[in-house]
Amino acid sequence: MITSIQGLLVEATPLRAVVEVNGLSYEVNVPVTTAERMPRAGSVVRLHTLVVYREDSQTLYGFASADDRDFFRLMIDNVTGVGPKVALSIMSRLSLPLLVGAIRSGDIATLAKCPGIGKKTAERLVVELKARVGATGEAVHALLAADGSVPARTPHADAVAALVALGYRVNDADEAVRRASLALGAAATTEAMVKKALG
């Protein structure tokens, strides 16, 4: 099992990266949320990976964090009708904190807005993962409070809520806050992320 890959980032698009390691180039499918965090082509990159074997293919999926990879695996292993392509689409649209929060709170509307899934698949995500969200190891423990619930107030969640109150759609607000957080760093305050997202 290939659990990570580190090498020279030869090429990157919003859904694919080519990483060269010791003269071999690996094509890695990535969600947009990972592509946003990758360095420029020509830099060294490290991706946490999962290989999916099918009868006719072997596909490598890469993520910026082990948490994202573990949640991707959780979706494809436990949700009927959600394969790697649909899971990648979901993770491209929603950041992990927002995705976990939507599942825990049963927010079908937010999940159904992801490309490739409708209301029924969104409902299956909630039903089949709600009880498992606390059991994904380190992937979700960092996002959950000690009692297993999603923290009600985090700078990321507060910034998303502020943008939604200003009229942004949830998915657009989440994307804007992710970009602001990347630009400002992990210690950014809610106010700073909102200002950066609006600017």
Image (cartoon, rainbow, N blue to C red):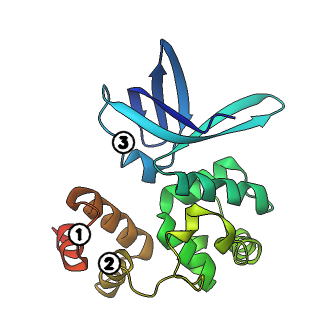
**Residue tagged 1:** 188
Residue under the image location 72 percent in, 55 percent down: 76
Label 3, secondary structure: give it: loop
Mark sitting earlier along the chain (2/1): 2
Residue type, numbered disc 3: Met
In this rendering, the answer to whether 67 lies above or below 151 is above
In this rendering, the answer to whether 92 lies above or below 111 is above
- Is 160 situated left or right of 116 in this image? left
In this rendering, the answer to whether 167 lies above or below 197 is below
Label 2, secondary structure: give it: helix
Label 1, secondary structure: give it: loop
- Residue found at the far right of this picture: 55
Q: Which mark is residue 163?
A: none
- Is 74 situated left or right of 31 in this image? right
Q: Which mark is residue 38?
A: 3
**Residue tagged 2:** 155
Mark sitting earlier along the chain (1/3): 3
- Is 3 situated left or right of 131 in this image? left
In what quadrant of the picture does the C terminus appear?
bottom left
Q: Position of residue 49 (x, y in %)?
A: 58, 41
**Res 136 quadrant in image:** bottom right
